[in-house]
Amino acid sequence: MRILHTADWHLGRTLEGRSRLAEQEAFIDELVEIVRNEQIDVILMAGDVFDSVNPPAAAEQLFYESLARLSDKGRRPVAVISGNHDHPDRISAARSLLSDYHIFLFGRPGTAVCQIDVPSCGETMMLAPLAYPSESRLAELLSSDHRETALRDRYDDRIRALLTAMAASFTKETVNIVMSHLYVAGGHTSDSERPIEVGGAYTVAATSLPKAAQYVALGHLHRPQDVKRAETAARYSGSPLAYSFSEVGHAKSVTVIDVHPGGMASVTEIPLAAGKPLVRWKATEGLAQVYRWCEEGKDQSCWVDLELHVTEPLTMEEIYRLRKLHPGFVHIRPVFPQRVEEADEMSRETLSLEEMFCRFYKRQTGGQTPDEELIRLFLELAAEEEEEGGEE
């Protein structure tokens, strides 16, 4: 059986207000092509279909169109679970309608195991689909003890118990797979993921993943990665697009698993080409350097985070010209090296509070010196603040 594992599509997501829908459509086109070329038997989508619980209509339309194309009119099973970004009831709303086309949708966590007959390979998959299991979606209070360590231990115990109960349905004659949307301890995170753990409380140990599973398909982390210390093959497929500049340089992919009943899973990473890369520019030579890069066509098809070193604030005309020269600028962040140096110099010196205030005032007012009355008022306020802080 050949299984394709994908996750974290985040359909409808924008980048600082810029639509990514065209890139997401290109990803679906590429995914359909991969499924055909790799002769995939089953597709698993491990949560975060959408970027919000109330996605735009265009994102929902793209999702249902992708299901129709990937399932090939019911000839190829597709299973989808909800992630922490998804509304569980929205994901499962069309469940009864789509199940006739071998499309299986799971919105809320439970212990039911799904038997999926796969005609293309003549084998059967036993799928344990644990949709994002927060306390509220599990509809239970995991611990009355609000200490982080107690809640983390209780959460880990609960998830282990759920997965163990589901794994009891696995057999030697079937391909046995777990799919969930979890944060497993030790995974590499990025800024584009909405945290699902409260200070680390919603964290699962790698050893809590059931050994009886031949493969554990995970969603939530956007960087493709294997789960270390797991007692079976377990992996995050990652997101298909880079959704924040913390993902600069991350290669995107989907995962293909070859596995037979009773055998070891063989895991292959298939790289993705769809989507604009995210890049960072650091223009230490000022505007002229940025103009030169734009004229050379540098990173023309990328989203750009620009750090621009200048001596004076940028005018609206200069910002407009930059955005016209390169439509991919997302952030334009002016940096004033002289001010940075001054701040570094101040941090190295031992200055009194009065001296620091005078330097700050001069910098903010273009060189003016604060009078004695203003200095006295500032010091009084600072003293009052220190007294109040000491009483807490």
Image (tube, rainbow, N blue to C red):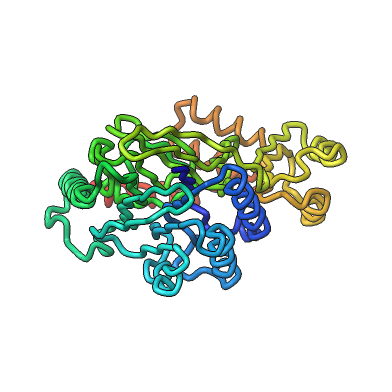
Expressed as whole percent of the image width and height from the top left, the position of residue 127 reads: 33, 52
Q: Position of residue 52 (x, y in %)?
A: 47, 64
Q: Is residue 63 left or right of residue 366?
A: left
Q: Quadrant of the N terminus?
A: top left
Q: Which residue is at a point 31% across and 46% down the rendered structure image? A: 174
Report the front residue among 308 and 260: 260
Please state which of residues 43 and 22 is positioned toward the viewer in this rendering.
43
Residue 140 versus residue 312 in the image, above or below: below
Q: Is residue 321 above or below residue 64?
A: above
Is 235 displayed left or right of 69 in the figure? left
Q: Position of residue 129 (x, y in %)?
A: 33, 55
Question: Quick check: 391 left or right of 379?
Answer: left
Image location of residue 269, percent across then percent down: 52, 35
- 165 sits to left or right of 120: left
Give the residue drawn at x 22%, y 66%: 139
Write down the quadrant of residue 47 in the picture. bottom left
What residue lies at 34% left-to-right and 34% top-to-bottom?
263
Task: Using the image, determine if residue 317 lies above or below residue 230.
Answer: below
Q: Is residue 373 visible?
A: no
Q: Nearer the viewer, residue 272 or 222?
A: 272
Question: Residue at left 36%, top 50%?
Answer: 124
Hey, which residue is sitting farthest left in the picture? 144
Farthest residue in the front direction?
Answer: 122
Residue 189 versus residue 389 in the image, above or below? above
- The answer to which image quadrant residue 249 occupies is top right
Question: Taking the image as drawn, is residue 53 in sight?
Answer: yes
Tally of marks: 0
